[in-house]
Image (cartoon, helix red, strand yellow):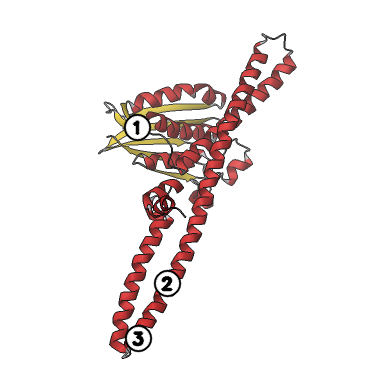
Amino acid sequence: MTFKKISSQLNIFAQCKKFGLPLWQCPQFLFLIMGIIIIGSIVTSYAIGIRYIEDPEMVALVSLLIALILFVIAFTITRSFERLAEANRMKSEFISIVSHQLRSPLSNLRWAIELLISGRLGKIEEQQTEYFKILKENSHRMEELVQNLLIVSRIETAALPSKKQEFSLEDLIRELIKEFELFAKASNVEIFFEPQVNLPKIFTDPSQIKLVVENLLDNAIRYVKEKGKVLIKLEERGQNFYFEIKDNGVGIPKDDQKYIFQKFFRSENVMRYQTQGSGLGLYISKAITEKLGGKIGFKSQEGVGSTFWFTLPIK
């Protein structure tokens, strides 16, 4: 093993960055903490030994034996954590690479379908147009899934870029509501927005906040059955913005609520309705909100509806 490689292994911060883990979860940092605990255990056992055991050699032997046992346990646990961290890193890299590779062919497929539907390459029969529309819709769903997987990969490897700037959160929400108008109309859902007057601007990453609001608004509309309404509130509370979105949709069963922010999780009642979704939106929303210094939560009752909220620091 070269000096450079040894130096890299001893660099705790570099190893944590490599695995995309916070310091307190990093195997090398845990090994360091365990080393400190081992040293403390040796000193303590020696102090107890010289008090109760007359033979100093026996005291030293017992202390060394305890240290050896603790060191083996610490090394085994740390190596296990390191293997898990390395497997997780490789999984995230694999997802990232595959997602990147899929984006181009999916985009080309979408453009080809749009060109065929346009009729510029020849007349398209009505029945053929319907099939092309189905292909277009499914390719769009695949693009959304690939995009979400890419975002999840960047979140897990701490590689999601953040460009903070001052902007109006109220204006961003109004623009998103306008983008969702057709989807809401097709779903027979009315959207109401009630912002507090004279709201200040927020200093954060607009692209990431847009992802959070998009996911929450998409879920609110998607999980409303028959005629429904979605109510959005935006308020200033102390040094934070408070965002709330309430729907009268299918709600979340009580037993499923503890899993709602986990990756790929979808509640049983949603599966019964065969509603489309990847189960990544809420995981992404929670990760982004917490990364930007905010909090996210919800309350829900099955058959009545759900209310999701998040807070973000204004500055």
Q: Residue at (46%, 43%) from the top-left corner? A: 157
Position of residue 284 relative to residue 144, above or below, is: below
The residue that mark 3 highlights is 57
Q: Earlier in the sequence, mark 2 or mark 1?
A: 2
Q: Return the residue found at the far bottom.
A: 54
Which residue corresponds to mark 1? 234
Q: Quadrant of residue 106?
A: top right
Amino acid type, callout 2: Leu
Residue that label 2 marks: 70
* Extreme residue toward the front, this view: 2
Camera-near label (3 vs 2) is 3
Q: Which of disc 3 and disc 1 is earlier in sequence?
A: 3
Q: Position of residue 147 (x, y in %)?
A: 53, 32
Q: Is residue 6 left or right of residue 315?
A: right
Pick the quarter of the image with the C terminus.
top left
- Residue positioned 52% across, 40% down in the render: 280
Q: CA distance from mark 1 to mark 3?
A: 72 Å
Disc 3 + disc 2, Cβ < 8 Å: no
Q: Secondary structure at mark 3?
A: helix
